[in-house]
Amino acid sequence: MKNIVILISGRGSNMEALIAARDAGDLPVNIAAVISNRPDAAGLETAARAGIVTHFVNHKAFAGRESFDAALAECIDQFAPDLVVLAGFMRILSDGFVRHYEGRLVNIHPSLLPSFPGLHTHQRALDEGVRIHGCTVHFVTPTLDHGPVIIQAAVPVLDGDSEATLAARVLCEEHKVYPQAVRWFAEGRLRLEGGRVRLDAGMAEGAVLISPEVR
Ligand code: GAR
């Protein structure tokens, strides 16, 4: 069974979705550890309650990005993960860190990348007037919120949506696509090859989830 390490910075609802999928028997992985860069991340308590080893590596204790990333990698590597899963981990990662985990580092982002990398994605989607919004799971490259796309989910932007209602609609889809992407990896069906995502035959169809309202 594949070993995964999950990195969080806050609430940890995507992490919870992964734990729930594992507990339901839908995600054949060993969640070896949950690591946060913030000691007060609410998700750390949730993970501990689920019996998962937790750690925090406080970025404020380091002089620069490289030294923090080196300490973080040391913490991660003691668990020998096959896959490192960024689940609301709100840090820009150094090139060296990203290279070290090439092909085994994935992220979820609350927009249909390459639109709206960075912060405040839902408000920016509303401001632009886009009719379709969503989320993306991708392999991580040194560019922020960028990299070969594994799966996306699309939701409609409805008249009268606020940032909060749109965020909630997207989050609901995040909780479906992230376990799906990690499941593909766990089953050996997903890999990065020459900078492109390879999903085993028959799986590509599953790489987009479109809510019925968008269809
Ligand atoms: C999620 O919406 C995730 O997509 C986003 O942070 C939130 C974390 O929520 N990640 C990013 O914006 C990364 N650029 P969670 O802690 O409840 O999973």
Image (cartoon, rainbow, N blue to C red):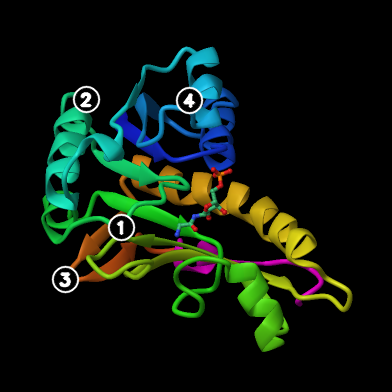
Position in image of residue 66 (x %, y %): 13, 50
Q: Which residue is at the far right? A: 160
Q: Earlier in the sequence, mark 3 or mark 4?
A: 4
Residue 121 visible in the snapshot: yes
Kind of residue at badge 4: Leu
Q: How far apart in space, not on screen, are marks 1 and 2 (Cα)?
A: 22 Å
Question: Which residue matches tag 1?
Answer: 92
Kind of residue at badge 3: Gly
Instruction: Specify the segment rendered in magenta.
Output: 203-215
Q: Residue at x 47, y 12 (%)?
A: 51
Q: How far apart in space, not on screen, are marks 4 and 1 (Cα)?
A: 20 Å
Q: Nearer the viewer, residue 118 or 206?
A: 118
Q: How far apart in space, not on screen, are marks 2 and 4 (Cα)?
A: 17 Å
Label 1–label 3 contact, CB within 8 A: no
Question: Which residue matches tag 3?
Answer: 194
Q: How far apart in space, not on screen, are marks 3 and 4 (Cα)?
A: 35 Å
SS state under label 3: loop
Magenta stretch encompasses residue 211? yes
SS state under label 2: loop
Q: Earlier in the sequence, mark 1 or mark 2?
A: 2
Q: Nearer the viewer, residue 140 or 66?
A: 66
Question: Which residue matches tag 4?
Answer: 44
Local packing at callout 4 (Cα closer than 10 Å; few below 14, some 14-19, many 20+) is: many
Residue 187 visible in the snapshot: no
